[in-house]
Image: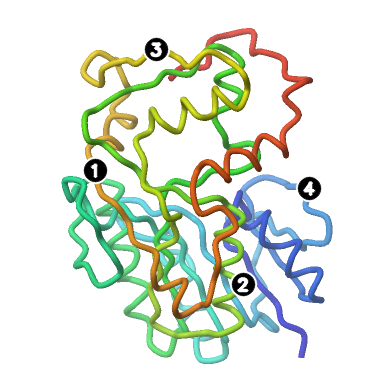
C-alpha cells in the first residue's frame, strides 16, 4: 500500500519534507489558503475545498493555533477522530514556547510546560486538544526558532536593516529546517505514538552572536549593538525576548538515532549562505522594519 502524507498547511517545513517523501514513492497532499506551485504534490485549497481522507496514512499539521486552540480540530475534529485508528502517524508542529521563561535554565521533554506568552498558551491548548483524541498515533514536535534558505539574516544584513539587539544573558535555541525534516522522517520510520520531541540544535546562543557571525560570513561590518530597552521593538518582537531558556535535544538523538546536519548556527548559516544567491541581491526600495 502506498504511503500518503497529508500536510495540513503546506508551509516552509512541508516544502522541505515533501521532496524527500516523493523520492521514496510516497503520495503527498498539501493544503493552502491560496494556490501553490508544488511539483508532485496534490494541492487542495483549504478552507474551501473538501479534504479527501481515503488512503491517507500520515498527517502533518503545521497550522498555527488561536485563542480557541487548533483551528484544524475546530473544523475537522469528527473526520480526524474517525480516521485516527487507521493512521500510522500524525505529527503536530508545536513550539518550545510551551515551556515559558526559564531564566536561561535548561529544559527537556520531561520539563512540565508552563507557558508565559500568548502564543505559548495557545500552543499548549492545541497540544492538549490533539492528545484528547482516542487512538490517534500522535507525535508532538516542539520547534525552536526555524531558519534555513530564505529565512536567514543575510538579506537584512545586505540591505543594512539588521540590528544586533542585546538583552543581557538572553539566549535562543534554533533549528535548521533540514534538521526538522530529518527528524520527521526518522519519526515516520519508527513511530512512537504519544512521543514528544524537542527540535533544536546543540548550541543555544545570544541573537547578537548569530547576527555577528552572519555578517562575518558576508564580509560585512558587524552591526553595532542596540540595547534591548532602546530598540523600539514591536510587541510581538518583544514577546520573544520575554522567554529565556536553553532547550535540550537528547531524545531525538537517543530515540530517533538522529545526527544533526547543523549542530550549531555556524554550520547552519554557512549552508544557508551557500544556498542563497547573494550576488544577485537587490535591496528593497522601502524599509522593511526590524
For the residues marked 3 and 4, what is the alpha-carbon distance in whole angstroms?
40 Å
Percent position of residue 184, x then y: 56, 69
Q: Is residue 117 left or right of residue 265?
A: left
Q: Secondary structure at mark 2?
A: helix
**Residue on which the image places disc 3:** 224
> Which of 159 and 170 lies nearest the eye of the viewer?
170
What SS does tag 3 mark?
A: loop
Q: Residue furthest top?
A: 285
Cα distance, mark 1 to mark 3? Answer: 23 Å
Point 34% across, 35% down: residue:
206
Q: Which residue is mark 4?
A: 37
- The answer to the question of whether label 1 and label 4 lie on touching residues, with beta carbons closer than 8 A, is no
Which label belongs to residue 243? 1
Q: Disc 4 on helix, strand or loop?
A: loop
Mark 1 or 2, nearer chain start: 2
Q: Quadrant of residue 268?
A: top right
Q: Marks 3 and 1: in contact by CB < 8 Å? A: no
Amino acid at each position: 500500500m502506498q504511503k500518503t502524507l497529508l500536510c495540513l498547511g503546506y508551509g516552509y517545513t512541508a516544502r522541505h519534507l515533501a521532496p524527500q517523501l516523493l523520492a521514496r514513492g510516497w503520495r503527498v497532499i498539501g493544503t493552502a489558503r491560496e494556490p501553490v506551485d508544488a511539483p508532485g504534490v496534490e494541492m487542495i485549497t483549504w478552507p474551501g475545498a473538501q479534504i479527501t481522507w481515503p488512503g491517507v496514512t500520515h498527517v502533518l499539521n503545521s497550522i498555527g493555533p488561536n485563542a480557541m486552540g487548533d483551528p484544524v480540530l475546530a473544523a475537522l475534529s469528527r473526520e480526524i477522530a474517525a480516521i485516527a485508528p487507521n493512521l500510522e502517524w500524525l505529527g503536530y508542529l508545536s513550539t518550545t514556547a510551551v515551556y515559558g521563561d526559564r531564566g536561561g535554565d535548561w529544559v527537556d521533554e520531561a520539563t512540565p510546560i508552563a507557558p508565559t506568552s500568548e502564543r505559548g498558551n495557545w500552543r499548549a491548548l492545541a497540544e492538549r486538544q490533539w492528545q484528547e483524541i482516542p487512538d490517534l498515533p500522535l507525535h508532538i514536535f516542539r520547534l525552536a526558532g526555524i531558519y534555513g534558505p530564505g529565512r536567514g539574516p543575510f538579506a537584512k544584513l545586505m540591505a543594512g536593516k539588521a540590528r544586533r539587539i542585546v538583552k543581557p544573558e538572553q539566549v535562543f535555541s534554533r533549528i535548521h529546517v533540514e534538521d526538522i525534516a530529518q527528524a520527521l522522517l526518522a519519526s515516520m520510520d519508527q513511530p512512537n505514538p504519544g512521543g514528544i520531541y524537542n527540535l533544536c540544535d546543540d548550541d543555544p546562543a545570544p541573537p547578537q552572536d548569530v547576527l555577528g557571525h552572519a555578517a562575518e560570513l558576508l564580509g560585512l561590518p558587524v552591526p553595532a549593538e542596540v540595547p534591548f530597552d532602546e530598540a523600539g521593538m514591536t510587541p510581538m518582537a518583544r514577546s520573544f525576548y520575554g522567554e529565556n531558556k536553553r532547550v535540550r535535544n537528547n531524545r531525538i538523538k537517543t530515540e530517533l538515532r538522529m545526527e544533526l546536519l547543523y549542530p550549531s548556527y555556524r554550520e547552519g548559516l554557512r549552508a544557508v549562505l551557500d544556498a542563497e544567491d547573494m550576488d544577485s541581491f537587490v535591496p528593497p526600495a522601502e524599509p522593511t522594519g526590524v
